[in-house]
Image: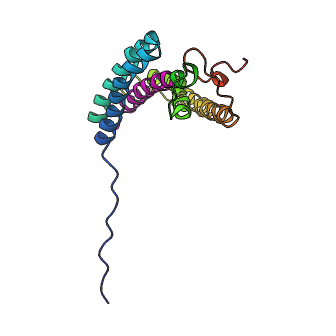
Amino acid sequence: MTALAPAHRFRPPAPATWAALLGAVAALSTVAAIPLSVLANQNVDGAIALVIGVPAAAVGAVVAGRLPRNPLGWLLLAIGTCLVLANDGSDYALLAYRLGHRLPLGMVALGVNQLWGPAIELLGLVILLFPDGTLASRPWRWAAGAYCTIYVFEIAALAVATAQAVAGRTMRVDSNGGLAATDQPAG
């Protein structure tokens, strides 16, 4: 009998690779944000996303690449990337649904636009974990656990509301390019 050659094991990419990949997504989204914001006449909204998102993603990429076990870097990278992507999504959705451009990925843009709220809410974890990526004391674990539980429920509720709006074809887009069913649920 012949022995089988050992199977090649899949090795996930190194944390620095993930940090570089997310940083590249944030950089490409930033490049796309400028013309999208100008075309959609949303210059102020685009500037806000760039002022908060780009520095957060840049600092996060550096920290996550150098200190991969520190959650602050990953949180900042996620926040920055999500803010810039959400800005692109809202501008794209505005162009597709309110300004009459026939763009193919309007529904994807509406979904991506929903990232802005969860991204801002992650700042609470950054505050809890500042400055060294650990909680200050044992009682803060309860606060962090409660915060994360509420965050997960909020993400689930947002996903359900977005899916219902898209499935029901009630894709009204507000003046900022957001899905009206989730941005203004009462009408």
| Region in magenta | 67-92
Residue 26 lies in quadrant: top left
Q: Nearer the viewer, residue 58 or 64?
A: 58
Residue 82 position in % (x across, y down): 45, 28
| Residue name at image x 40 percent, y 16 percent | 52
Specify the quadrant that holds the C terminus.
Answer: top right
Q: Nearer the viewer, residue 24 or 166?
A: 166
Which one is in front, 168 or 144? Answer: 168
Residue lying furthest right in this view? 186
Split into 4 quadrants, where in the image is the N terminus? bottom left
Q: Residue at x 57, y 27 (%)?
A: 147
The answer to whether residue 85 of the structure is visible from this angle is yes
Q: At x 46% / y 22%, what residue is drawn?
A: 87
Residue 60: horizontal and vertical position, in percent? Answer: 34, 27
The answer to whether residue 122 of the structure is visible from this angle is no
Magenta span contains residue 187: no
Q: Position of residue 90 (x, y in %)?
A: 51, 22
Measured as percent of width and height from the top left, residue 121 is found at 52, 23
In the image, residue 68 lies in the stretch drawn in magenta: yes
Query: Considering depth in this image, is 88 or 55 the residue closer to the camera?
Result: 88
**Prevailing SS of the magenta stretch:** helix
In the image, taking residue 181 as reference, residue 11 lies left or right, namely left
